[in-house]
Amino acid sequence: MAFVTHLHDAQELRKTISARQHTVVFFHQQWCSHCKKMEPIFKKIARLVEYKEVKFCELDLLEQEDLMKELDIKTFPMIFVFRCGEKVAATGPCKVEAFKTWLSAAMTPHKTVETLIEEGTTCTGIYEDRRGNLATLLGRCKPFLDTESGCVFQPTPESNGLQIGRANQGISDFTITMWNSETEDPNKIFFGLHFMPDPTQRARFESAIFRVIFGRDNGKEGHSPLNVLELAPTSAADTIPASPDDAIEPGSWSNWSGEEPVRQRTETYIYGSGLYSSAAGWGFIEGTSQGLDASYTLSVLLPRTTRICIEFWAKAVLIRGDTKPLDPRHKVTLKIGTMEKPYQRILDLSVAMERAKPKS
């Protein structure tokens, strides 16, 4: 980025912000879609003559979890203003004029500065990909972070489903999708768990856990709990067998029409819990060494509401059959977020509820 200095690590960051009165730092990650949208705005502001005395920098936080924890950065992008080494203001993605107003206030001593977050950012299903050998070695045990935290998904007939999380090691991947159905109550939410192990490594998924918390989105007032009225499956007996001919093609998760069928083996142990509480969870364990099935469909029915906040995390254990049990690459846990840093999505059902109204 022209007029913007690229920083590489925490040491360089500390040295830079302590050397000047004002430093503005753009923290991002390379696969973050909102970061890509904010980058040209940041670059445009950095060019303005009124900020010629201000140092503008950017720092990619990939593989820098200690610095993220130190700075308390949970979503991307984040922009900080430092004054003589001390953080005085922070903001998320925003439009040009809002950013200029915020930055001018941040440069004024003793002035209260609000954090700006652009509302209504639409989910796109973007994800991190750890396919390269180096990324696999460095990142295979670290959780995949949320690239679209707080984005809004509005189901419509044209876009009836969305990928909301994905973790991979090489070609093997574990994906979560979400949708609702034209023929069901709008507040019945479906989740798909999809397992695609690499056949060239004789890989299989041994087990998986998915946890999700539901709340009514009250805007700036926060979230109030939404208790689950119906939950499925609660066991393997609740699932619906599907034909092997129903296999889903890899890479087709982002958007689709209709519901995904359940893939179920009688030897897979499934347990679900959370009925009448705001937190639901499912576990999957292979009964033999054949691995989990390709796909499972989960569902909850929630009380009638227009906007739902969903926080979730998941993990799946991948076994590579082309390695020995003592090989550190033999068993890898793929994590989509964590209990401490869950993914967050806003589900806007206003259009779905309008469609569901009886026609007069």
Image (tube, grey):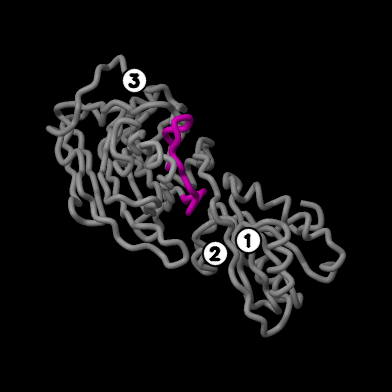
- Seen at 49% across and 47% down, the residue is 138
Snapshot quadrant of residue 22: bottom right
Q: Secondary structure at mark 1?
A: loop
Q: Is label 3 or label 2 in front? A: 3
Report the span colored magenta. 145-164
Most distant residue in the left direction: 237
Q: Earlier in the sequence, mark 1 or mark 3?
A: 1
| Mark 2 residue type | Leu
Q: Earlier in the sequence, mark 1 or mark 2?
A: 1
Spot occupied by residue 339 in the image (x, y as percentages of width and height): 34, 57
Which residue bears the numbered disc 1?
A: 9
| Mark 3 residue type | Ala
Q: Are marks 1 and 2 in contact (CB under 8 Å)?
A: yes
Q: Is residue 315 among the parts visible in the rendering? A: yes
Identify which residue, 167 or 358, lies in the foreground.
358
- Seen at 21% across and 29% down, the residue is 289
Identify which residue, 19 or 181, lies in the foreground.
181
Residue 255 within the magenta-colored segment of the rendering: no
Q: Residues within 10 Å of mark 2 (few under 14, many from 20)?
A: some
Which residue bears the numbered disc 3?
A: 247
Most distant residue in the bottom direction: 110
Q: Are marks 1 and 3 in contact (CB under 8 Å)?
A: no
Whole-angstrom CA distance, mark 1 to mark 3, is 44 Å
Q: Is label 1 or label 3 in front? A: 3
